[in-house]
Image: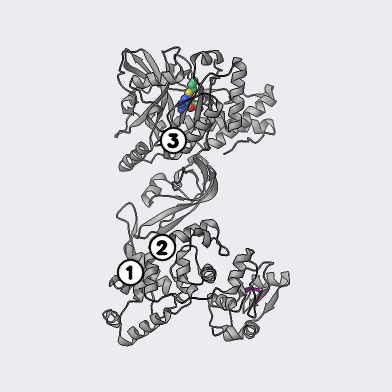
Amino acid sequence: MIDTAAPLASPSAYADAVATAVQAAAAYYADGSTPLGDDEYDALLRSIAAYESAHPGQALPDSPTGKVAGGAVTGDVPHSVPMLSLDNVFSAEELESWAAGLERRLGRPVAAWCVEPKLDGLAIAARYRAGRLQQVITRGDGLAGEDITHAADAILGLPAELTEPADIELRGEVLLTQDQFEHANRVRADHGATPFANPRNGAAGTLRAKDRPYRIELTFFAYDAIGPEDLAHSALLEHLAALGANTAATTAARPQHCAGTTEVQQRIEEIAALRAELPFGIDGVVVKADLAADRAEAGSGSRAPRWAVARKLAAQHKVTRLLGVEWNVGRTGIIAPRAVLEPVVIDGVTVTFATLHNPADIERRGLMIGDQVFVYRAGDVIPRVEAPVLDARTGAEQPIAFPEACPRCGDAIDTTEQRWRCIRGRNCQAVASVLYAAGRDQLDIEGLGGTRAVQLVEAGLVADLADLFTLTREQLLTLERMGETSADNLLAAIAAARTQPLNRVFCALGIRGTGRTMSRRIAAHFGGMAAIRAADAESLAGVDGIGTEKARVVAAELADLAPLLDRLAALGVGTAVTAPAATATAAGESGTGDTGGDGGPLAGEAVVVTGSMTGALADLSRNQMNELIERAGGKASSSVSKRTTLLVAGEKAGSKRAKAEELGIRILTPEEFATLVASHLSA
Ligand code: IVH
């Protein structure tokens, strides 16, 4: 959360800040869109206020400070009593000093407080005569608002008739609950309309709209009224509920009576903790002096009452840049777009990726690469991209390219549904994972290329890695273009794969974040598949180079793979127990990731390989070179740093060689290196 506002250094910086704030407020109150996130807007207002108090003579007439809605909006229906805004505090300390200020002003402690959610919608006033709804008005500039009576019958919780024939004006917030928001966007999609970016934007647009061919329901929460005098605020809320109006008392974040600021702070924490589960958005918690006498005596300023304050919570909607879109294929073949974002902190968490639903949704939202976009994150939900900030376009934005073939297996895409899917469905995953497992750096099964993998999967013979090891000669011979020799060769290659070392069998599982290097480290650390299978996130985090986040992902995937691991174990694949390699274990446990341990000609060496290998090493892939280095007691790495102690530089070695020379690192030719590790070459 932003709780420090950047100081404005000059009159022109101040004038710019005022212009930006006025523009943002106008957009926010017009249709809920704004080029600024809420946190940024609040910080901007605080900078402006700080500048004005330091330079009292320079305040501009259109400055948003001291004005309801930042002075951005007006209306033509005068309010009976001004509809005020609220002052904000951003921390427990600021709240304490605000409360102390109020108590100083009153000359006595505030007898009781009422603490309630700050609903993230739009304020309205609803006038009733003899219990019948007459007119609904927006807040506008606080003195006059717009007539939106036409929208009243779509607002749940705002009855056309009260339970008593009262003359009263209800005041409260209109919003879209999460369910209403999702429903509204489905309805809009059916009508080919742009989805609402977020519930607030949807509520603003819906209250204004007059001629829509569809109906969108909203929800009202009453939090104030003009009419009943002398009631404590908590009693007033009960009265409003008894009249038939909806109040926050119907929610888990119900208003609570608190005796002192300790209780107030506690209830704020409780409401903040409930935020993610509430069925509607809140952007803070409102603290109000409960007794009518305290409120009357405290009075109000031109913009806000002195008896209430909003303790703002970090914004859940933030603006950042859409850098790219990735297309990921799920287990069932669904091809899901994922936004790659310029990292942005939302409510204390750095967000780099967000979901984008499906291609049709991307088109409806009109998103482009390079756009400033609204991103929403709450609680544990997956962050999502809401909408582009159209005003922020520069012309350099690029269209989002949709895939023409399945990004995993390369086959066609079924685009008949909103969610695109590889035509292979679940088999897409099977073909891709079998192909990966059979690859040269994994199980190295010669004769199992793309066509064969597709044949095996489509014939229903192979659905996962374990099935490969159950294939019989008879089964293979049923496949087209599979002669006896090919079948025998393939079976022999599969039989050889059974005895591949643990790191390769583990790598063949294709667990996210575990490529060849990480698989070698995990294999060396645990020494056997049974130990890997039993590993939890904590023990995985003990492996060199696995952070806690990756450890969590690997542990979760291992848990998912348990049935497959059981079958592989029963089939004798990857069951050989390898003594943990002294090197990688030592590196892991030392926590330095530095160099290897004792034993072998490369003990203590951190080795990088570059260029093409020749002589005895000519046929080795990079992975095989790295395996060789580790067998010989060294630690393999892919980039040259000051920790590197040895570079094996083959033909056409480029920048890595130059860097090693610059750092004075020992450099060997492939032939010299082969001699050094000769005794480990054939292992
Ligand atoms: S009391 C004079 N209570 O927040 C009374 N306002 O940022 C002033 N709001 O204009 C309002 N939840 O639109 C109050 N429980 C609540 C509220 C609430 C949301 C809105 C209201 C107000 C704005 C100020």
Q: Dividing the picture into quarters, in which one does residue 590 lie?
A: bottom right
User: Looking at the rendered structure, which numbered label has been put on residue 463?
Assistant: 1
- Label 3, label 1: how many angstroms apart (C-alpha)? 44 Å
x, y (%) of residue 206?
Answer: 37, 31
Contact between labelled residues 2 and 3, with CB atoms less than 8 Å apart: no
The vertical placement of 87 against 424, above or below, is above
User: Looking at the rendered structure, which numbered label has been put on residue 281?
Assistant: 3
The vertical placement of 390 against 453, above or below, is above
Looking at the image, tell me whether mark 3 or mark 2 is earlier in sequence order: 3
Residue placed under numbered mark 2 in the picture: 407
Question: Which amino acid type corresponds to the residue marked 2 in the rendered image?
Answer: Pro
Regarding mark 2 in the picture, which secondary structure is present there?
loop
- Please name which of the two marks, 2 or 1, marks the residue nearer to the observer: 1
The vertical placement of 241 against 270, above or below, is above
Contact between labelled residues 1 and 2, with CB atoms less than 8 Å apart: no
Lateral position of residue 550 relative to residue 328, left or right: right
Question: Which amino acid type corresponds to the residue marked 3 in the rendered image?
Answer: Gly
